[in-house]
Amino acid sequence: MRGHAVVIAGGGPTGLMLAGELALAGVDVAIVEQRTSQDVIGSRALGLHARSLEVLDQRGIADRFISQGQRHPAVHFQIPLDISDFPTRHNYTLGLRQNHIERILAERVGEFGVTIYRGREVTGFAQDERGVDVALSDGEWIHAEYLVGCDGGRSLVRKLAGIAFPGWDPTTSWLIAEVEMAEEPKWGFHENKLGTYAIGKAEDGKSARVVLVEPQLRVDDEPTLRDVSEVLVAAYGTDYGIHNSHWVSRFTDMARQAAAYRDRRVLLAGDAAHVHPPMGGQGLNIGVQDAVNLGWKLAQVVKRTSPESLLDTYHAERHPIGARVLRNTIAQTALRRRDDRSKALADILSELLAIDEPRRRIAAELSGLGVHYDLGDGHDLLGRRMPDLDLVTADGPLRVFSLLHGARPVLINLGEPGGFDITPWADRVQLVDATYAGRWELPALGVITAPSAVLIRPDGYVAWVGEQSQSGLAEALTTWFGAPAAG
């Protein structure tokens, strides 16, 4: 039986990002993917939010994506919310379709030599204290220490693990398609009592991309060109002579979240852990960030640097983030209803979001820049993303994010050089003496008090803050990066 340290079910953006994180840490990881190539059929995610771009920047690969996308200075929650004044190098949303995002992530995984079992699916598994035996659709079994389900909203891994998936059943369905039309359509948005429709030009510049509200909820059958034609006629009075479809798909406002992101040696990430309406374009982004949170922790456990209990922090930190995304997408779905009461509520909310503080708060949540993990009381930075400061060191200037390219934690000493001795963790944690003279500012909070030192995890979040003291540093190092090496 072949074996790997980690097997990932699903080679979409979440699975690819996780595989890259594990491979970067030197972990033997393999992906099982039912597609025979990385081609994406149909319309999926359309871009990357600011925090996703930051985590890619932390690994030194953001430019691969930015060079192929289009920058937009806003996120959307009922109305566009400007983020161009946010204190980040990536104060925009990057328009880039999922097929391009996956291709770039797959290229990175290929650079690491990650094994991908293409044209196959995970069909079963058995786990015990020694690991997980994973059954593939071609009859082969492979062994892993851990199995991660990144296999989408209908996740078989989640179902076979017996993890509950509570939430809200769908109430509305939409058709989304790329079609050819004989007549010039009514471009842009169109509203009626059911909701908002849209027709825009497809990427090829010739076909039309349509998003249509279905008159009745439909979930059980595969949508067809005829379905698109019927909804167009009902909404516009004509189907504009549609005669060919490149693809047709359906989505709903169902929202569900896994009750647990881990069952012993089986974990969930991305859509396998949470599904929700696509409003705000958060699905791919939250999955990528799940992967970055899980990757370094799983790598440390596999390499026996940290105890298995470190994996419990994955659920503790990411489950509340997923719950917030479910909440805000459900709210956005409700605001899209076109009855008079819903429209009145949407109008009032639009007025509120035009005020600076509500705009900043909601935009920080949607962009991912406002994520705050509960790591206890203390400095405002604790549990939040570390800003990408321009530091000055004895070796010259450097950006904070450049210190994270290898996914190694770093302790930045901003006080007297040589003030810290972390010799027992020197094989795991970088120590950098630096200075920074500018303001410390966070997107959701504004200006904060400058610390004297910060301990940054590989995912870019602050695990400890020094305020003229080293109190608690050894405990934080042990908690996040394992027991000190024997002297």
Image (tube, rainbow, N blue to C red):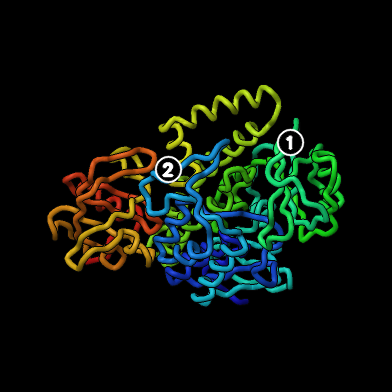
Query: Residue visible at 44% across and 44% down?
Result: 83
Query: Residue 144 or 393: which is nearer the viewer?
Result: 393
The local crowd at label 1, few if under 14, some if 14 to 19, many if 20 or more residues have their Cα within 10 Å, is: few
Say which amino acid is labelled 2.
Answer: Gly
Label 2: state its secondary structure.
Answer: loop
What numbered label is drawn on residue 171? 1
Query: Residue 159 or 287: which is nearer the viewer?
Result: 287
Rendered location of residue 1, percent (x, y): 62, 76
Asked if residue 319 can be seen in this view, the reply is yes
What is the total number of numbered labels drawn onto the structure image? 2
Q: Is residue 249 above or below residue 147?
A: above
Residue under numbered circle 2: 370
Rendered location of residue 405, percent (x, y): 37, 65
Q: Quadrant of residue 301?
A: bottom left
Say which amino acid is labelled 1.
Answer: Thr
Asked if residue 130 can be seen in this view, the reply is no
What numbered label is drawn on residue 186? none
Label 1: state its secondary structure.
Answer: loop
